[in-house]
Image (cartoon, grey):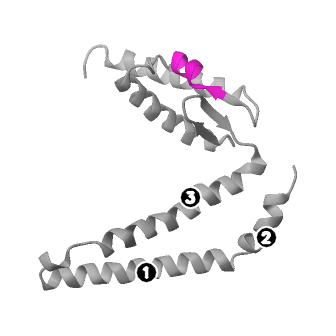
Amino acid sequence: MFRYEQERDSAKKQYKQEAIEYILSFNYGETVMHEELSKILHYNINDEKEYKKYKLMMQVIKNYLIEKGYILKSISGLGYYILKPSQVSKHCYRTYILKAGRTFDKSEFVLDHVDKTELNDIRLEEINNIMELNKQLIDNTWKSIQESTYYSRKDAYDNSED
């Protein structure tokens, strides 16, 4: 271990804790600005390398804040919006559940466009099996969504005023 490594890590931990406490001082529905967070975390977000480090640190912080009931949604170039509890279900549906379906669709698109003339028999079998699995995942995912109570009540949820 380097002589000053522990001090540096300790400072990073302190900055992270300060950023978490700062965010927790906000209420649901408010926006926490990148400028303020980057100052607390000691990152220059105008520098590309520093900005990447800032985003990585904010991912760690965002994951920690989930346990505290704070779900942060990135607002490009501005900061993070703290979702209201009434917004979290819809956010999860769009961000995680539908994203899985879009990922399967992308996989299907990629697999459909592979040059199969270059594949030997075992690789052709492999790609065909993956295509079959992917199709099953697409069908099962969409069927599960359509048969869910959430989906049958989605319009009511979307039109509900909080």
* Mark 1: secondary structure: helix
- How many numbered marks does the figure carry? 3
- Position of the N terminus by quadrant: top left
35 in the magenta segment: yes
Residue situated in front as seen by the camera: 26 or 115: 115
Q: Position of residue 144 (x, y in %)?
A: 61, 78
Residue underneath mark 3: 96
Q: Earlier in the sequence, mark 2 or mark 1?
A: 1
Residue 160 pos. (x, y %): 86, 57
108 vs 38, left or right, is: left
CB contact under 8 Å: marks 2 and 1 = no
Contact? badges 2 and 3 (CB < 8 Å): no
- Could you say which quadrant of the image residue 75 lies in? top right
What label does residue 153 carry, if any?
2
Q: Residue at x 63, y 56 (%)?
A: 92
Q: What's under tag 3, amino acid-wise?
A: Tyr
Q: Which residue is mark 1?
A: 135
Q: Earlier in the sequence, mark 2 or mark 3?
A: 3
- Above or below, comparing residue 88 to residue 80 in the picture: below
Taking 36 as reference, is 155 left or right? right
Where's residue 154, x and y in %? Answer: 76, 67
Q: Nearer the viewer, residue 100 or 116?
A: 116
Q: Is residue 90 above or below residue 70?
A: below
Classify mark 3: residues with Cα within 10 Å, few (<14), some (14-19) or many (20+).
few
90 and 109: which is toward the camera: 109
Instruction: Check disc 2 and report its element: helix, strand or loop.
Output: helix
Give coordinates of residue 63: x percent, y percent: 55, 42
Q: Nearer the viewer, residue 21 or 109?
A: 109
Crowdedness near tag 1: few (<14), some (14–19) or many (≥20) residues, C-alpha within 10 Å? some
State how far apart marks 2 and 3 are (Cα). Answer: 19 Å
The range drawn in magenta is 32-40
> Quarter-wise, where is residue 27 in the image?
top right
